[in-house]
Each structure stands twice: as structure tokens, then as C-alpha cells.
Amino acid sequence: MDESTKVVVATKEATPESKTPVVRLGTVTGKPVEIKSKDGKTLYKCQYCGKYVNAEDSIENEAGSYCEHLRENGLDDKALADIRSGKTVDKVPTDDSGKEYVKIAVVHRLCDKHNIPISRLVKAFGGDRGLDPVLHPAFAFVYVGRARYISPWCATTEGLAFLKTLGQSGSPNPEAKTTKPVKSVKPATKVEEALAPTK
């Protein structure tokens, strides 16, 4: 039996709910990439982020396609940690008017409420890890703990209108006009205020 098929004792990296044997460890990180579930099914995990991935990605790359893409572009764990550290602040910042930044989760719910594809929000703030260019300066996020925060402008009518215009003309245009006039509103600072019905 070679190392690729050897069953080893479950480590703390194995999912707590499974408490089952690790079948295979990642060749780079040494973290589980293949485990057996309680019902005997084979499950695959990314050796970098620990998320479950499909079998093809795990077998060939021992990682999810996104994490593998990052490594192919020279971004290892240290580089990613450095990038995150550069985006981390100790407390929630405020904009020029003194309004606190809002959680991306708040704008996410607003997008759901106004039928704006979440993919547009993610693209606007530069992707899940913020590695791509932002499409508007207000969407540049910072970490406070584990949460991501963006300018309160993003939760206003203008911010949502910007997201609605993405993809309409093939390329983002912050100056693009929407089909309906946009009212000027004060930036939302609380979840309740952000989710209040629009007038």
C-alpha cells in the first residue's frame, strides 16, 4: 500500500463532525484532502482553505480551483496573509462625513432585496479576497476582525444604483445613468437603517 492510499489516524484538521479516518494528506500543507464520512462516502477538501471541493480538483490539484489559481500566480499562505494584514484595521472606520462603514453582509442583504446579483457586489469590491481592482473607490473593503466593511455610500441609493448599472453596457461606468432618477440619501450606518424600505 503506497502513501497515496494509506489510511492514517484522523487529525484535528479533519472535520469535527466526521471523526473519521483521513485517507490522504496534501503534499504541500500536510492537511487532509481526502476523508471518509460516517456513511463511508469519500469527501474531498482543499488543502489550503479546508473547504469541500469536487473530486476532480482534489485528485489532480489537492485543492479547489480558486486556491490553486492563487498558488499558480505566486500567492502562497504568507503572501495571502500579508495582503489580508494590509487590509485589516483595529476599529470600524468612518467616511469623510463621520458615518461608520457598513458590513458587506448588510449590502449583500440589500442586493437581495433589490434583485441585484451578488456577483456584481463581489466584482465591485475586487473579489472574495479583494485581490482584483475595485470598480469604485467606495467598495474598497477593510477587515475588522473577521468581518469586511465598506463605505456607507455603498448602502445608499446611489451605491445600489452603481451596482445595478454593472454589466448593462459591457463595462462598469460610475457615471452611468440608471433608467430611474436616483435620489440623494444619507449613508446608512445601521443594519435596520440600511434595510429600511426605499422611497
Image: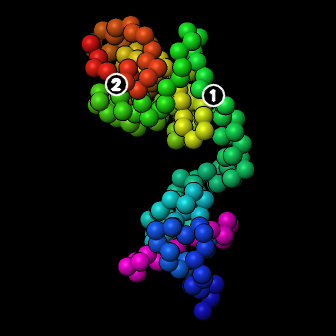
Q: Which one is earlier in the sequence, the residue at label 1 or at label 2?
A: 1
Task: Tell me where residue 61 appears, x and y as whole percent.
Answer: 57, 66
- The kind of secondary structure element at disc 1 is loop
Identify the residue at image location x=49%, y=26%.
Answer: 102
Identify the residue at image location x=43%, y=18%.
Answer: 188
The colour mode here is rainbow
Using the image as rendered, state which of residue 190 and residue 65 is in the foreground: 190
Residue type at mark 1: give it.
Answer: Lys
The reply to whether the magenta stretch includes residue 81 is no
The answer to whether one can see residue 80 in this image is yes
Residue matched to label 1: 91
In the displayed structure, 34 sits above or below 75; it is below
Quick check: 186 left or right of 47? left
Task: Tell me where residue 45 appears, x and y as whole percent.
Answer: 51, 65
Residue matched to label 2: 195
Using the image as rendered, state which of residue 32 and residue 60 is in the foreground: 32
In the displayed structure, 195 sits above or below 70; it is above
Quick check: 74 left or right of 109? right
Q: Residues within 10 Å of mark 2 (few under 14, many from 20)?
A: some
Q: Residues within 10 Å of mark 1 (few under 14, many from 20)?
A: few
Residue type at mark 2: give it.
Answer: Leu
**Quadrant (top left/top right/bottom left/bottom right) for the C terminus:** top left
The reply to whether the magenta stretch includes residue 30 is yes
Quick check: 39 left or right of 25? left
**Quadrant (top left/top right/bottom left/bottom right) for the N terminus:** bottom right
| Magenta stretch, residue numbers | 27-42
Identify the residue at image location x=38%, y=20%.
Answer: 193
**Where, by quadrant of the figure, is residue 114 drawn?**
top left
In the displayed structure, 6 sits above or below 76; it is below
- The kind of secondary structure element at disc 2 is loop
Task: Tell me where residue 178 appears, x and y as whole percent.
Answer: 32, 15
The main secondary structure of the magenta stretch is: loop
